Image (cartoon, rainbow, N blue to C red):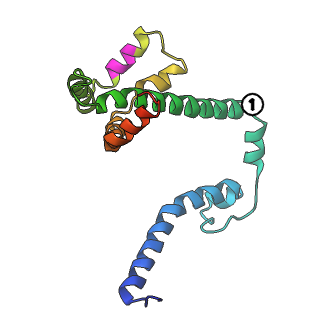
Amino acid sequence: MKKKMTVSHIIIVVVLILMALICLYPMWYTLICSVSDRAYVEGGRVWLVPKGLNLASYRRILKDDTFFASFFVSVKRVTVGCTLNLLLLVLTAYPLCLPQRRFPAGKYLKWFFMANMLFSGGMIPAYVLMRQYGLFDSFWSMILPGAVPLWNMILMINFFRNVTYELNESATIDGANP
């Protein structure tokens, strides 16, 4: 059965399309400015479509070795950072989701993590810490400060708590370990 489009539905669709265009236009404008001739851009004549196609900036970027080196550092940071994040999140969240009789220190650790989430030391102590550990100006100084995102840890704890006890019991009977 087909639903009839009402006036309110049409208004909602139009508003959402306008909001999407407002969000996407700055990216589109940046792209058309990057491929337009410099004289047209500086003259303010580029608005919706590129004028005077010029790809010299892209040729210059692709010839530069530092672009690819920087891109590789970004890819490496994302892959190593995500892997370390996920590993530390699971290794931290699983023990904290256990009942207090199985992991008595969990209550204190949860409060420790909550306090760290709410009250940050700030930028200067983080800088001093990286300097003291010898991580200043290194690859690891970008990854380690955010290695355990605490909000994600809370979400992971709640996810692990939603796994029913019967499922854990069944897996244990089948020979699985924690």
Position of the C terminus, as image quadrant, is top left
Which residue is at a point 42% across and 15% down the rendered structure image? 130
Residue 31's x, y, as percent?
63, 56
Q: Is residue 161 left or right of residue 55?
A: left
The residue sitting at 54% across, 17% down in the picture is 138
Nearest to the observer: residue 16 or residue 78? 78
Dividing the picture into quadrants, the one containing residue 46 is: bottom right
Identify the residue shown where x is 70% and y is 58%: 36
Q: Nearer the viewer, residue 77 or 47?
A: 77
Q: Toward which corner of the image does residue 4 lie, by quadrant?
A: bottom left
Residue 55: x and y, percent?
Answer: 76, 52
Residue 119 in the magenta stretch? The answer is: no
Most foreground residue, 46 or 93: 93
In the image, the segment drawn in magenta is 124-129
Say which residue label 1 marks.
65
Q: Is residue 75 above or below residue 108?
A: below
Instruction: Report whether 42 appears left or right of 64.
Output: left
Is residue 126 inside the magenta stretch? yes
Q: Give the percent coordinates (x, y) of residue 152.
A: 37, 38
Q: Amino acid at mark 1?
A: Asp
Give the overall secondary structure of the magenta segment.
helix
Label 1 residue SS: helix
Which residue is depicted at the point 38% across and 33% down? 149
Q: Position of residue 88 (x, y in %)?
A: 43, 27
